Amino acid sequence: MSNYRCNGCGYVFNEAVGDKHEGYPPMPFMDLPEDFTCPGCGVRYKEDFNLMPPPGQ
Ligand SMILES: [Zn+2]
């Protein structure tokens, strides 16, 4: 499981946790719906998120 961080606002989607507040269960980031928008800044494109290296690596 990995974390993906929004370039625009720093919001992090944790695949192992999902985002319960936004209604997303734990899931791979790439499996999020096509209409996923960043809860932090509203950016619509998953391409604007960066994969974060797992802790300890
Ligand atoms: Zn954002």
Image (cartoon, rainbow, N blue to C red):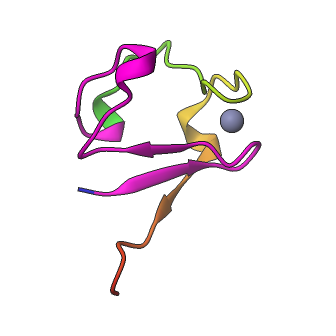
Is 25 left or right of 23, judged from the image as shown? left
> What residue is shown at x 60% (from left), y 24% (from top)?
39
> What residue is shown at x 70% (from left), y 26% (from top)?
43
Task: Note whether 16 is above or below 38 in the view shown.
Answer: below
User: Looking at the magenta stretch, what is its main secondary structure?
Assistant: loop
Find residue 27 and report its horizontal and vertical position in percent: 23, 34
* Displayed quadrant of residue 28: top left
> What residue is shown at x 50% (from left), y 12% (from top)?
35
Task: Note whether 2 is above or below 6 in the view shown.
Answer: below
Q: 40 or 30: which is nearer to us?
A: 40
Residue 13 colored in magenta in the image:
yes
Is 33 left or right of 38, judged from the image as shown? left
Task: Note whether 35 is above or below 8 in the view shown.
Answer: above
> What residue is shown at x 70% (from left), y 50% (from top)?
7
Q: 35 or 38: which is nearer to us?
A: 38
Q: Quadrant of the C terminus?
A: bottom left
Find residue 22 and report its horizontal and vertical position in percent: 45, 17
Start-end of magenta stretch = 2-29
Task: Note whether 13 is above or below 45 in the view shown.
Answer: below
* Displayed quadrant of residue 6: top right
Find residue 32 and report its horizontal and vertical position in percent: 35, 25
Instruction: For ligand 1, give the image quadrant.
Output: top right
Q: 23 or 51: which is nearer to us?
A: 23
Residue 6 colored in magenta in the image:
yes
Is 37 left or right of 17, judged from the image as shown? right
Q: Quadrant of the N terminus?
A: bottom left
* Residue, far front: 21
